[in-house]
Image: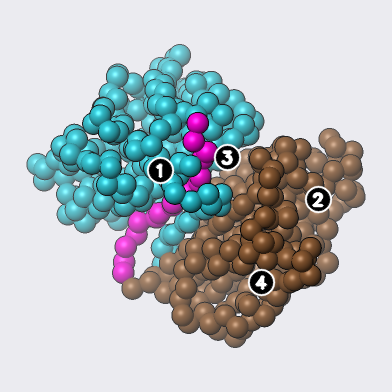
Chain colours: A brown, B cyan
């Protein structure tokens, strides 16, 4: 058996009540899961509304069985038509397709994503544009076969640019390039580590909304067929 | 600060490739989250398709901002109209509404749900019918205020009836009635414990699809504003 783990961690821009990043997960009708991550232009309420609109449309289509490439195109077309090319959002869809035994990453985002396996790290940074601004925008789609000791790391630009205002850099290439997949670190450990570094580089006041998704495929000894999800979020006391 | 934790665990009926229970989570447009749990009539592929249909419709409406009671009614009407009163599904919606500082449970399910706080355990078992069979079915809705040391426990009937074929009973009243909320057990610990007991009572061959959701509101020392989600699911190796 393989255990698929997905870890997600998010934090909003400092002193901004709402994060403009929205992350949604759905179970795919043919089996497997999709994680949809949108970063709405700007920050605060407007950005949140925008990323909510984009993810709502995307998960509705994915739940209806639409393929990821069609979803990314249609969500772009919707945003472009109804907001007249005046607002943009980045859109990443990470899908685990159990029937095809593969992971698909659809990217409408200048930010790269990373895959780490026993051969080392690969950066996927083909030119890619956010949705909403120009007609006929389409995603860059990458297929990764599902095998033990593979990590897929996807994030929004708040992570990539962490520390910039202090002339520091998160140096993801360095950090992920030295990552030993055989240690079998959990997806949540890697997620927390990346978000923690980014927040620290921004001196504990995130300069932008930050979101990280890490998927890990790890060997599993037991035959335990239980699926689990844990969600934790802080709420201010009344 | 309060930490809201939600734990989910699911397992399918023994020797059945697909679980007929579907669980989806969405972020609500006004803040907070909704968990939608549907148990499609029967088991296997037909039940899975049904519970997928029901949850898809529900999360699309919830993401559009519809109130939970309207969603449960509309999803029933849809199923009743298009499947002619011939199929049924149970539907539970557990929503954390951050603006109203409350938890709402909408129940179209003969199975009860439980709330445990410092005053003890409360069983919510007002008569409630599944959706799909009769015209004008509506949910039973319960509002719980968000406060420290509250646990909300929701599940499908595979949990409630665990052990039945061996003349055993899970005795949830007993187990949850003796639960000390001040111990601050995590939502995932309680979830895993409940599912583990149910599977054991069915002698490790679950007699039905089983799903558990536990929400816990616990005091939190730190000012950490990170939101986290972890998903783990086993996949058979090729």
- SS class of the residue under badge 3? strand
Q: Can residue B120 be seen by looking at this rendering?
A: yes
- Image marks 2 and 4: residues in contact by CB distance under 8 Å: no
Q: Residue B93's x, y, as percent?
A: 45, 32
- Distance from disc 3 to disc 4, alpha carbons, whole Å, reads 26 Å
The residue that mark 4 highlights is A114
> What residue sits 68% from the left and 74% below the top?
A172
Alpha carbon of mark 2 to alpha carbon of mark 4: how far? Answer: 21 Å
Mark 3, residue position: B27
Q: Of helix, strand and loop, which one carries label 1?
A: strand
Determine whether A175 is above or below B32 in the image. below
**Tag 2 secondary structure:** loop
Question: Marks 2 and 3: which is nearer the front?
Answer: 3
Does the CB distance between marks 2 and 1 fall below 8 Å? no
Q: Which residues are magenta?
A: A222-238
Chain identity of mark 2: A
Q: Chain ID for label 4? A: A
The crowd level at tag 4 (other Cα within 10 Å; few <14, some 14-19, many 20+) is some
């Amino acid at each position: 058996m393989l255990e698929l783990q997905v870890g997600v961690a998010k934090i909003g821009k400092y002193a901004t009540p709402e994060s403009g990043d929205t992350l949604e997960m759905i179970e795919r009708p043919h089996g497997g899961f999709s994680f949809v991550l949108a970063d709405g232009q700007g920050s605060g309420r407007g950005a949140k509304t925008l990323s909510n609109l984009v993810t709502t449309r995307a998960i509705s289509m994915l739940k209806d069985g639409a393929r990821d490439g069609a979803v990314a195109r249609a969500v772009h077309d919707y945003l472009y038509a109804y907001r007249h090319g005046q607002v943009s959002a980045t859109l990443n869809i990470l899908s685990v397709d159990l029937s095809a035994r593969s992971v698909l990453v659809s990217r409408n985002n200048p930010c790269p994503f990373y895959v780490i396996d026993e051969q080392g790290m690969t950066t996927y940074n083909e030119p890619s544009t956010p949705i909403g601004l120009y007609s006929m925008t389409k995603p860059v789609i990458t297929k990764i076969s599902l095998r033990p000791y593979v990590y897929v790391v996807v994030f929004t630009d708040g992570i990539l640019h962490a520390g910039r205002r202090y002339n520091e850099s998160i140096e993801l290439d360095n950090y992920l390039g030295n990552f030993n997949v055989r240690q079998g670190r959990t997806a949540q450990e890697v997620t927390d580590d990346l978000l923690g570094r980014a927040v620290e580089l921004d001196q504990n006041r995130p300069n932008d909304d930050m979101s990280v998704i890490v998927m890990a495929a790890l060997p599993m000894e037991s035959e335990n067929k239980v699926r689990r999800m844990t969600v934790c979020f802080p709420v201010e006391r009344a």
